[in-house]
Amino acid sequence: MNTQFLAEMFSAHIGIDLGTANCLVFVRDLGVVLNEPSVVAIRVNTKEVLAVGAEAKDMLGKTPGNIQAIRPMREGVIANYEITEDMLRYFIQRAIRTLPWFKRLLRPRVIIAVPSGITEVEHRAVIDSAKHAGAGEVHLVEEPMAAAVGVGLPVVDPAGSMIVDIGGGTTEVAVISLAGIVSAKSVKVGGDTLDQAIINYMKKAYSLWVGELSAEQIKIQLGSAYPVKDDERMDVKGLDLMAKVPKTVRISAAEIRDALHGPITMIVEAVRATLDTCPPDLAADLIDRGIMLAGGGAKLAGLDRLLTEETGLPVFVSEDPLNAVVNGTGEMLKKIQSWS
């Protein structure tokens, strides 16, 4: 009985989208079993983990001095190694508990999606963190490839397919052909950047300090990349920076679109830069195939229309953009050696 057979029979097979904003976990034969915020709450003096995921995110900006809510992933890479290990251990163990007992006998085989632009040091840090968290065999795949597989693009064909994956910390743009990335661009712009742009705008325009959770809600409700929501308005509550008292202001979607102009322009420029370095024959394929958007940022209203206007190519939003990367790791688990 060889090692390969034992690994197939008695270990879990797990795919992880280790995102800046959310961590999603796919278990082979079960599908996506976890989708939790990438947040860990710890007790400051003892480093004891108090909460992970949604429960910890609810504590952001609201903790007393002896408790700290931490986001250990920043711009798509590990910013805090120890906390990332704690988070991975929690998610891996929760995923394993969904399986029958005999699938828990060996350490799980894991595929983790990472940004295409990470360094060799960052690459090694992800592997080490996963192994310390309880993983056995660890394989890394590039996020744009996983996203392309996850949305069903024909990545193995000898023709060009283009994916734009807008995550919490990075935007990954790639042209793929014959199961390889031919042209790519990774920029440190994502959902977090959009949230920070809103926070900065509220401070400048209204002297109002709003937290990360409030900025995210504004983005979801009013955010757009094209004038499609300009009649919508909402009340925003925060802290008046001048009077130091709570205050409510009413803002419009047009204001938020202007606030998001800078980071959205960087995403558009990343798409253009990738097209500029794309071989002409593959670029010609994109006239018919167009550009596929994935990741949480793909849901930003009007982004597809803006990119069509800027590139002249048809742009589509995937049916399940938030799960694109993790679904791709799930498909890759079927032939794990082919993708590592």
Image (cartoon, rainbow, N blue to C red):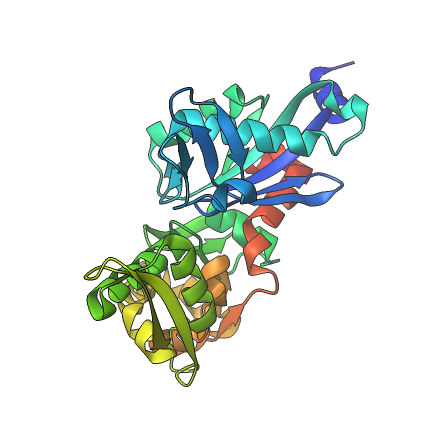
- Answer yes or no: is residue 180 visible: no
**Of the pair 150 and 54, the residue shown nearer to us:** 54
Give the percent coordinates (x, y) of residue 42: 45, 29
In which quadrant will I find the C terminus? top right
**Of the pair 202 and 317, the residue shown nearer to us:** 202
Picture layout, residue 331 above or below residue 171: above
Q: Which residue lies furthest to the top in this view?
A: 1
Query: What residue is shown at x 48% (from left), y 23% (from top)?
Result: 48
Classify residue 74 by image quadrant. Answer: top left
Give the percent coordinates (x, y) of residue 286: 46, 68
Give left or right: position of 277 versus 21.
left
Give the percent coordinates (x, y) of residue 31: 70, 45
- Answer yes or no: is residue 74 visible: yes
Picture layout, residue 33 above or below residue 156: above
Give the percent coordinates (x, y) of residue 305: 43, 78
Query: What residue is shown at x 55% (from left), y 56% (from top)?
Result: 322
